[in-house]
Amino acid sequence: MRTIRIYAGAALLIAAGLTALAQPPQTSAEMIFQEIKSLVLDEKWTEAEARLDDFIVRYPQSPLYGQALYYRSRCLENQARKERAALNSYKEYLRLKDGNKNLAEDAEVSIIDLAMKLYDEGDKGFVREVEERISNPNKVVRYYAAVQLSYVKEKRIADKSVPVLKQILKEEKSAELRDRAKIALMRVSPQALAAVEELSSDRKPRMLRITIAGGREEKIEFSIPWSLADLALAALSEEDKAALRTKGYDIAKIIRDLQSVKGNLIEITADGKRIKIWIE
């Protein structure tokens, strides 16, 4: 009897061992995914992409499947000449609707960046990806799409960003966000920006006045809203500002001087011409 019990016990242990071998440990997918995420954090894009492709095939039912698609998209985005594949991979991830709002938002923004890059390289059809996102229910995506759309050369397309840019100026309190919207709106429609600035103020908008005199009869005068002039001057690249400083013109100082005292007048004489700049 004792011998029979020993054999029976051994048989049960063998059967349990075979069952355990037939099924992977519950944590195997999680462990593999953590290894892959380490590769992503180390920016080993090619290796991480290959591992993610394998993970997606092996674990289609894993709760981590959606994240695997998202990180594969990031790997593709960060490799040269894989912009189309990355864009399509992000769209595949978004179709899952896995509920991760942060990853979905980041995927939408990445699609906009990739589409604009492809557009700039000559694939004009990709601008539709940006156009579609100016009506996105996510405010961050909608605003970002509108700002990027303002760079499009075709005016009929760029004009589609105007309602969203005006919405930013009307509803948002962030000074940085409003400034970005102003610069974008100035690119697309300076008249629309001037109208928004005028409506948002109880008083007549300040104007930048400039006169250029080069002789007895030669004289040029023009005026533009200060909001546009301020943004235009502030938007100059550091290289342009440095080039102007070599000629004795410090843009930052000019802006400060004009704003510091009401009616302040700046006079510049150069190449036989006298330039007067002031704000009214």
Image (spheres, rainbow, N blue to C red):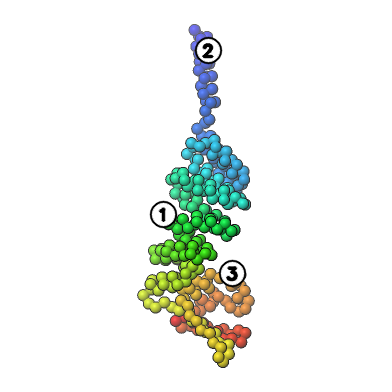
* Percent of width and height locating residue 229: 50, 75
Chain-order first, disc 1 or disc 3: 1
Q: Is residue 89 among what the camera can see?
A: yes
For mark 1, give the secondary structure.
loop
| Residue at 53%, 73% in the rendered image | 233
Of tags 3 and 2, the one toward the viewer is 3
Chain-order first, disc 2 or disc 1: 2
What is the residue that sits farthest to the top in this orientation?
A: 1
Q: Nearer the viewer, residue 11 or 135?
A: 135
For mark 3, give the secondary structure.
helix
| Residue at 53%, 78% in the rendered image | 254
Asked if disc 1 and disc 3 are in contact, CB closer than 8 Å, the reply is: no
What is the residue that sits farthest to the left in this orientation?
A: 202
Q: Looking at the rendered structure, which numbered label has been put on residue 137?
A: 1
What is the residue that sits farthest to the bottom in this orientation?
A: 216
Write down the residue under mark 3. Answer: 238
Q: Is residue 261 among what the camera can see?
A: no
Of tags 2 and 1, the one toward the viewer is 1
Q: Label 2 amino acid? A: Tyr
**Mark 1 nearby-residue class (10 Å; few <14, some 14–19, many ≥20):** few
| Residue at 52%, 36% in the rendered image | 59
Q: Quadrant of the C terminus?
A: bottom left
Write down the residue under mark 2. Answer: 7
Residue 187 as seen in the image, left or right of residue 82: left
Q: Label 1 amino acid? A: Pro
* Percent of width and height locating residue 64: 49, 40
